Amino acid sequence: MVGAATGESDGRDGARAESRGLEIHFDRSEWPRTDFARGRVPLSEFEGVGRRDGIDAIRRPRLVDQRRAERSLGPSEPVLVASVGRSARAYPLQILVWHEIVNDRLGGRPIAVTYCPLCNSSLIFERRVGGRTLEFEVSGVLRHSDLIMYDRQTESWWQQLTGRAVVGRLAGARLRALNSQVMGWRNFRARFPGARVLAPPRFYDRSYGRTPYAGYEDAGERPFWFYARPVDRRLPPKERVAAVFADRQVVVVPFSRLRRGGALSIRVGSIPVLVTLERRVLSVLDRADIGSSRPVGTAAAFDRRLGHRTLSFSRAAGDLIDDQTGSRWDALSGRAIAGPLRGRRLRPLRHDEQFWFALAAFYPRARIAR
């Protein structure tokens, strides 16, 4: 079945593993408390690729100030930024690539900071469901190559890319996605000068600053452990995309399109949207040493309406300029930094950045902006 507006697939559309029948491809004996009778997707779509808790989620995050974090982060290294109210925090991808989930609290809210390297999907959720605060761990199971999380309270399984419980007592429940943004370390420091930063946890023998996924960035390669449905061929499987969620619809903007102009004006449903690209952000899936990896960029999305007018934008000598007033805008924050509108800010919209194959697997009816 597919969500009527967003086109999200919950797996009940008859998809089956290619030439695999309905076999179970994970060890059920590791999950005595999980209620497999309550499921939203066929169990044959899950792929056990490691042992339960083989990747250690972070339960008690260690936070440091920016001066200490600076010692291990280059100016263009990517950090996932969470913001709740006036509180903000950075989670370096050089740490998330090893741990995938951080259970934290920010602005009084319990949050789950998540990153699936195989899908390049970084999302932050509020981890309170039905009045209960959940704590998340890494299952060692994938579905459509995407991380399956489980909560320690009920051992229900959760799809990272959608935030929905797909197996167990909480099947059908959904985590609330919070606004988040990947940006380079230098940009984070400039925008949030007093914010704290996740530091590597003690007592783990991990090569932080290096990636275990060297070479995975190559766009033409088939993704790992992606069996249950054909790869959508409208774009290369590992094309980076920004998926904009607005007006109950999803529109996908390929990074290759953004690189041609640095910004793109589109409509998502009835909402006029600006999607921008900051080019100088490194991949954590390219070279073994993250600091020497290639820049792949990061995107941002904003509502183009400001007051009673809708702005349109152009690039001039590398600057983002609105056509109505000639004001100059910061591409990542959506704030006017010079001109008649200086100090005004566009409303940010939820957008997720992933590899195309993953986005298309879960939102098969998403429209591609050209």
Image (spheres, rainbow, N blue to C red):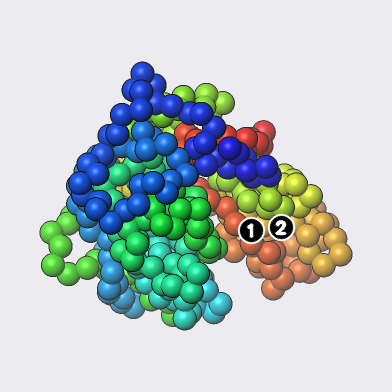
| Residue 188 image offset from top left, x and y in percent | 46, 66
Residue occupying image coordinates x 50% and y 53%? 172
Residue 21 placement: quadrant:
top left
Residue occupying image coordinates x 47% and y 44%? 40
Residue 199 placement: quadrant:
bottom left
Residue occupying image coordinates x 82% and y 67%? 307
| Residue 347 image offset from top left, x and y in percent | 68, 64
Q: Which quadrant, please, contains the C terminus?
A: top right
Task: Please tell me whether mark 2 sits on a helix, a strand or a loop.
Answer: strand
Circle 1 crowding by C-alpha within 10 Å: few under 14, some 14–19, many from 20: some
Residue occupying image coordinates x 79% and y 50%? 270
Name the kind of residue labelled 2 in the image: Asp
Residue 102 placement: quadrant:
bottom left
Mark nearer the N terminus (2 vs 1): 2
Does residue 297 appear anywhere in the picture? no
Indicate whether 191 appears above or below 275.
below
Circle 2 crowding by C-alpha within 10 Å: few under 14, some 14–19, many from 20: many
Residue furthest top in the image: 19
Q: Is residue 137 left or right of residue 316?
A: left
Contact check, label 2 and label 1, Cβ < 8 Å: yes
| Residue 198 image offset from top left, x and y in percent | 32, 69
Of the pair 190 and 35, the residue shown nearer to us? 35
Does residue 119 appear anywhere in the picture? yes
Q: Which quadrant, please, contains the N terminus?
A: top right
Q: Which residue is mark 2?
A: 303
Q: Is residue 325 left or right of residue 87?
A: right
Indicate whether 92 appears above or below 210.
below
Query: How far is mark 2 from mark 1, CA to CA?
Result: 7 Å
Indicate whether 112 appears above or below 343.
above
Q: Which residue is mark 1?
A: 349
Name the kind of residue labelled 1 in the image: Leu
